[in-house]
């Protein structure tokens, strides 16, 4: 069984509406999480990865 993240990436790569929604969500989450020192957190890493994978 594929992980939820892999399912998301597959959907992003095949559906432009899903990809746009993911990019919008990541953009909003970045506005929420601008704290200094949080650059290397797991959360930031996953958001950057999702943004790259859904581009």
Image (cartoon, rainbow, N blue to C red):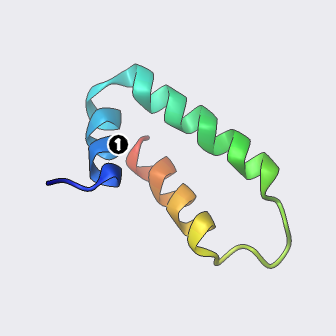
User: As rendered, which of 1 and 14 lies closer to the eye?
Assistant: 1
Which residue in the structure is indicated by mark 1?
8
x then y, percent, for residue 54 = 41, 42
- Looking at the rendered image, the quarter that the N terminus falls into is bottom left
Determine which quarter of the picture holds residue 43.
bottom right
Query: At 43% across and 31% down in the image, what residue appears?
Result: 19
User: In front: 2, or 38?
Assistant: 2
Return the x and y of residue 16 as percentages of the image width and height: 38, 23
The image quarter containing residue 34 is: bottom right
In the rendered picture of this protein, how many numbered marks are placed on residues? 1
- Report the residue at 39% width, 49% height from top: 53
Q: For this view, does 32 lie left or right of residue 6?
A: right
SS state under label 1? helix
Left or right placement of residue 32 versus residue 45 in this view: right
Q: Position of residue 48 (x, y in %)?
A: 54, 58
Q: Position of residue 35 (x, y in %)?
A: 85, 67
Q: Is residue 41 left or right of residue 55?
A: right
Position above or below: 38 against 32: below
Q: Residue at x 75, y 74 (%)?
A: 38
Badge 1: residue crowd in 10 Å (few <14, some 14–19, many ≥20): some
Residue at 61% of width from left, 37% of height from top?
Answer: 25
Q: Quadrant of the C terminus?
A: top left
Q: Residue furthest left?
A: 1
- Furthest toward the top, the residue is 17
């Amino acid at each position: 069984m594929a992980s939820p993240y892999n399912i998301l990436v597959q959907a992003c790569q095949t559906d432009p509406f899903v990809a746009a929604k993911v990019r919008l969500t990541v953009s909003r989450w970045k506005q929420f999480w601008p704290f200094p020192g949080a650059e290397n957190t797991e959360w930031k890493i996953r958001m950057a990865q999702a943004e790259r994978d859904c581009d």
